[in-house]
Amino acid sequence: MKILVQVLFFSFFSIVTAQSPTTDCNYKINVDTEEEIFKLTQQSLAEFMVGKGQTVFMYFSLMKQGNIKSVVLHTSLNALEMPPMICYNDKSRITFQLENGDFVPAPFLGEETCGRQTKGEESLNNMTSEGAFYIDEMSIERLSKSPLKSMRLTTMNTNFDVQFKEVISNREIVEPIYPREFFIENLGCIE
């Protein structure tokens, strides 16, 4: 009898474990009803750069609205001089280069938009921008199989190239961040 109870317990545990998602999703918004699907993950630090009188922070989050899936890029520039405005239009895109050599384009979703600038009275000047970039099923498949290597952000005015770090870690960051693994670890959150 004891063996039968143990077999039933382990069978039940195996079924429950197999049905549990392997991705630990941290949502900012999660609406999944018959009428509407809208998911937005919390921002994750993807890159930061310090130098030349300025600091740049870039964050990724993932979004699903209906059947449309996208990566949202949040950018914050802090500088002694007023940072340039980042604007997106229908020609804007992110192109990811993966470690396996593949390139994954993600075109901008939405209407022409520009970031916000704030003049620092007792602090640095600031510019923030946010844009959603479409990722189709082929892109999702590629991004889920290989870590990121670099990214080119094409805006209305210019291009920005980013080489992703293996790990972002310091005393202020509780757990290390692995930006190259962002899509591999999080794409399940918008499936």
Image (tube, helix red, strand yellow):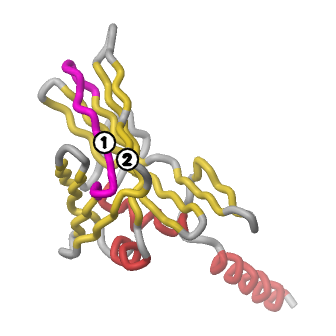
| Dot label at residue 87 | 1
Q: Quadrant of residue 133?
A: bottom left
Name the residue: 39% across, 38% down: 173
Residue extending farthest to the right is 1
Depth check, front residue: 161 or 132:
132
Instruction: Please tell me which residue is depicted at 44% across the width and 64% down the height of the picture.
Output: 185
State the mark number for residue 43: none
In the image, what residue type sits under mark 2? Glu
Q: Residue 35 appears at what percent x and percent y? A: 74, 64
Q: State the image quarter where residue 135 is shown.
A: bottom left
Q: Amino acid at mark 1?
A: Cys
| Secondary structure predominantly adopted by residues drawn in magenta | loop
Residue 124, percent across and down? 28, 18
> Residue 22 location in percent, x, y?
55, 70
- Please give the range of residues in magenta: 78-93
Which is more foreground, mark 1 or mark 2? 2
Residue 8 belongs to the span the image colors magenta: no
